Image: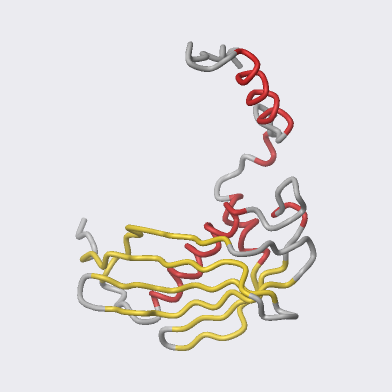
Amino acid sequence: MAETTTVVSKQISPETATKVTNFITRLGGGALIPAKYEGHDLHSDLLRSLLKVQHVHRGRITCILTVKPYACNSYNTLHGGVIGSVAEMVATACARTVVNKDKDLFLGELSVSYLAAAVKQTEVIVDASVVRSGRNLTIVAIEFKLKNSEHSTSLCRATFYNMPAANL
């Protein structure tokens, strides 16, 4: 692996650049990942292992997400990237309950509002519901809430474009 050199703007002090570089290094930036963890679709497999489907209805899906250590950030709470990835996965499944199979779904926008942390080993309810679905557009709202207290931890909204399936 080739070594990279950090380019620092003249507008940033060397002390600030060092603090930023050290912060990213402490979080694991630049760490080598063993080859056994670079398999095809491993990321999706890890995310799916967090979820257990509870209910599937037309326009609505509910899952239970268990916050496992590998899905946590350095504060031992559910990582924001995991929330976004799970939101996309569950929203796509929810949209599929109302959009015909002859249409491809293209995720055009995903917004996430982080409201509170979900700590390691807690269970989180992931509730997705179709807000609107038309000929060209499907919007899904996703709420993450703690199972024991039902306090919301994240609110998400996914906008899908319904595209005609490609004929190859």
Q: Which residue is at a point 48% across and 15% down the rendered structure image? A: 11
Q: Which residue is at a point 40% across and 73% down the rendered structure image? A: 140
Is residue 63 depicted above or below 78 in this figure?
A: below
Quadrant of the frame with the N terminus: top right
Is residue 161 depicted above or below 25 in this figure?
A: below
Residue 65 percent across, percent down from the top left: 67, 70
Q: Quadrant of residue 36?
A: top right
Disc tally is 0
Residue 116 percent across, percent down from the top left: 65, 64
Is 101 or 60 nearer to us in this picture? Answer: 60
Q: Which residue is at a point 70% across and 24% down the rendered structure image? A: 22
Residue 50 percent across, percent down from the top left: 67, 65
Is residue 140 depicted above or below 72 in this figure?
A: below
Is 100 or 13 nearer to us in this picture? Answer: 13
Query: Is 70 placed left or right of 132 in the picture?
Result: right
Query: Is 69 placed left or right of 84 in the picture?
Result: right
Quadrant of the frame with the C terminus: bottom left
Residue 159 percent across, percent down from the top left: 34, 65
Is residue 29 depicted above or below 5 in this figure?
A: below
